[in-house]
Amino acid sequence: MTVYAEEQAFPAALRPAVHTIVQQVAGGAPERLPAGYRVVHAGEALLLPVRVYYPPAALLAGAAREGEAGLVALCLGTRHHDGHVRERCIQGVLERGVPWAMPFVLQALGDYVLPVVLHIEAGRAASARGWDEGVAARLAGDSPAWFATLERRAISYWNEYHRARYPQRQAYPACRVLAALRGDAALTPR
């Protein structure tokens, strides 16, 4: 059986569902994924993809599936090269999410597409099903290098694209969420 790189992005228990979804959305042809983001979640080392390049229609069809398979497709879609697809998928993860999806939600805070970040902030504020503050804080605490990279990315995108709208860095939605998580995880303030 072919092992797909995407399987490394999810807990071992989900790998059969990941395999099925990747076969569906990628037509069985494994992607050559760029090096990913290393994160520790619930004691497992995961490797989140930087970007995926599935055909959007195939990915969204996979995301429409019920259960774990659909949520796996949504999580992978948060890493899609098309910002509109990422936005739709982050909405879906926040609506249907479970704790194992949190690494994908947090990784999306380092996105330059403002609607993606705004959906996450709104999901956190509304205590959306796909937002778990405790899991998010543990991710930050268990993966401090990854979390620091997220903060640097958010600051960089704020400075480059969103500074006119949010003159103070602390007002930028991704920075607000990340600062709160830094406090929850008892990490040294930036």
Image (tube, rainbow, N blue to C red):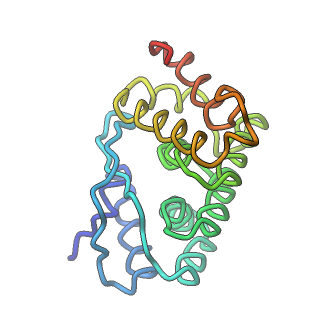
> What count of labels does the image hold?
0
Please, which residue is most extreme toward the right here?
126
Front in this rendered view, residue 142 or 68:
142
Q: Is residue 132 above or below residue 12?
A: above
Q: x, y percentage for residue 79?
A: 48, 61
Q: Is residue 87 above or below residue 172?
A: below
Q: x, y percentage for residue 114?
A: 68, 51
Q: x, y percentage for residue 77?
A: 53, 65
Could you tell whether 71 is left or right of 114 in the image?
left
Front in this rendered view, residue 115 or 41:
115
Q: x, y percentage for residue 175?
A: 61, 32
Say which residue appears at 60% left-offset and 73% top-offset. 65
The quarter of the rendered structure image containing the N terminus is bottom left
Could you tell whether 65 is left or right of 53 in the image?
right
Say which residue appears at 61% left-offset and 69% top-offset. 85
Could you tell whether 125 is left or right of 170 in the image?
right
Q: Is residue 184 above or below residue 144?
A: above
Front in this rendered view, residue 140 or 93:
140
Q: Quadrant of residue 56?
A: bottom right
Q: Is residue 173 above or below residue 56?
A: above
Please, which residue is most extreme toward the left here?
1
